[in-house]
Image: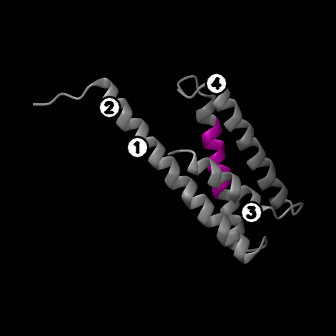
């Protein structure tokens, strides 16, 4: 019977984690695109902002964790991006912006970097 090594198990966990992150970011992108089509006052816009904020709050919490294995500089960069996304989402929510496309573009870049 084949025994899995710790490295193989961890590699699978990392691959699964990246896949889940990609799926969540795909959903955020799809929702943001619907918000762009339907406008800032639409239900889709509200749902996209709510979902995207939840995703980035969770990512930032994970990136701040001492258990996160990404290099500190990468974590810091991603936290900065997350803070920008949260601030931009708040500007949209308070009707000071309608930059759904900017958020969608950034989220797309991050998702594509998870390969």
Q: Which residues are magenta?
A: 51-60
Badge 2: few (under 14), some or many (20 or more) residues near its Cα, within 10 Å? few
Badge 1: few (under 14), some or many (20 or more) residues near its Cα, within 10 Å? few
Look at the picture and state if 40 lies above or below 2: below
User: Distance between the Cα atoms at labels 1 and 2?
Assistant: 10 Å
Residue 59 inside the magenta-drawn segment: yes
> Magenta: predominant secondary structure element?
helix
- Give the mark nearest the N terminus, 1 or 2: 2
Q: What number is the disc on residue 101?
A: 3
Image location of residue 106, percent across then percent down: 69, 52
Instruction: List the residue tagged with mark 1.
Output: 16
- Give the mark nearest the N terminus, 1 or 4: 1
Instruction: List the residue tagged with mark 2.
Output: 9
What secondary structure is marked by label 4? helix
User: Distance between the Cα atoms at labels 3 and 4?
Assistant: 29 Å
Q: Image point 82% across, 60% down: which residue?
A: 92
- Give the mark nearest the N terminus, 3 or 2: 2
User: Distance between the Cα atoms at labels 1 and 4?
Assistant: 22 Å
What secondary structure is marked by label 1? helix
User: Distance between the Cα atoms at labels 4 and 2?
Assistant: 23 Å
- Given residues 109 and 85, the one toward you in this image is 109
Image location of residue 16, percent across then percent down: 40, 43
Look at the picture and state if 92 lies above or below 55: below
Image location of residue 37, percent across then percent down: 71, 76
What secondary structure is marked by label 3? helix
- Count the labels in the image: 4
Q: Quadrant of residue 96?
A: bottom right
Badge 3: few (under 14), some or many (20 or more) residues near its Cα, within 10 Å? some
Q: Image point 63% across, 57% down: which residue?
A: 51
Instruction: List the residue tagged with mark 4.
Output: 72
Residue 3 inside the magenta-drawn segment: no
User: Distance between the Cα atoms at labels 1 and 3?
Assistant: 28 Å
């Amino acid at each position: 019977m084949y025994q899995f090594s710790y490295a193989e198990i961890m590699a699978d966990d990392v691959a699964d984690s990246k896949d889940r992150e990609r799926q969540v970011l795909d959903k955020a992108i799809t929702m943001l695109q619907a918000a762009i089509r339907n406008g800032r006052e639409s239900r889709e816009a509200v749902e996209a902002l709510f979902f995207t904020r939840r995703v980035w709050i969770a990512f930032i919490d994970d990136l701040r964790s001492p258990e996160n294995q990404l290099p500190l500089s990468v974590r810091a960069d991603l936290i900065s991006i997350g803070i920008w996304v949260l601030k931009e989402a708040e500007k949209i929510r308070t009707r000071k912006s309608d930059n759904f496309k900017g958020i969608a573009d950034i989220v797309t870049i991050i998702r594509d970097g998870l390969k």
